[in-house]
Amino acid sequence: MTSIKKRTTAALTAAILATTLAIPAIATEAPTIRVSSYKGSTLEVGERSGLIIGPSGTEYAVTSSDPDTVAVDQVLTFWVAVAKEEGSAEIIVSDSAGEHGSVTLTVGSAVPAAPEAPASGDSTGLTDNLEIRQEMIRLINQTRKANGVPELPVSEALMNAAQLCSNRRYTWHHSPEESQAAVDAGYPYGFGDNLTVFTGTADAAQHAVDNWINSSGHFETMIDPRCDCIGVGVAQHDGITYCYMFVGIPNSVNFYA
């Protein structure tokens, strides 16, 4: 009887152990704060890049693991990474609830700047008005979140395409040129876009987003659930503000690609 009990106990122990070993490992939880750099993960010495942090509408603390390589500055409500010297540094973002996220930035040596092209708006000023543009993205994502659709990460290609079109100071849609701008910037799919032009330069981000919210067609484009990324552009000239929003629609077709 004792031998039977021992064999039974051993069998149960083996079964329990087998069951325990069969439990899959728990996947590492993804960071709850999203962090990216507008100019990408590689910067040149002396370069500044805005940090895109989400979810929006939250106050964050931002630090660098190596401020001598990449420092961080707060400009109004935005954070900017400043490349100081060659190397790598981790930019760590946290909130009051203890959530966190990070991005690693690598700094290379500066290269001589290419000569500026004529001020036609076609190839210059792609980083103009960065603070206004970051605020526009924040407000657009805030609107999307309030309407039950996901916030959008920034696409550098669409940022450049939207800024190029803004620099051209269009006052109505030029669909072939807008489509070509997206292709030339490196975005291969179809997209939706909004344009608004208004007199004045104060509170430009809020003014632009309010205009789109108050126009049903523009509003639907802004909260389109199919979209997976965003880019915006702002140009100001002679007291007039020109704003574009491009939202990428994956697996759709840009006929100019």
Image: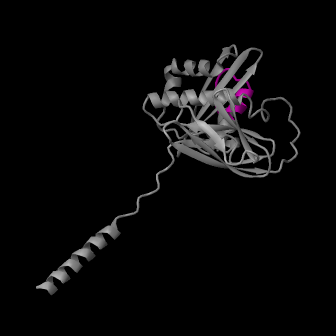
The quadrant holding residue 233 is top right
- 106 vs 208, left or right, is right
- Front-lying residue, 66 or 231: 66
Q: Magenta residues, as a range?
A: 161-176
Q: Position of residue 216 (x, y in %)?
A: 49, 21
Q: Position of residue 61 (x, y in %)?
A: 60, 37
- 231 vs 85, left or right, is left
Q: Magenta stretch containing residue 169, yes or no?
A: yes
Query: Which residue is painted at 79% across and 44% down in the image?
Result: 84
Q: Position of residue 68 (x, y in %)?
A: 76, 46
The quadrant holding residue 114 is top right
What colouring style does the render use?
A: one colour
- Asked if residue 142 can be seen in this view, the reply is yes
Seen in the picture, residue 212 relative to 37 is either above or below; the reply is above
Query: Which residue is painted at 47% across and 37% down in the image?
Result: 150
Q: Residue furthest front?
A: 2
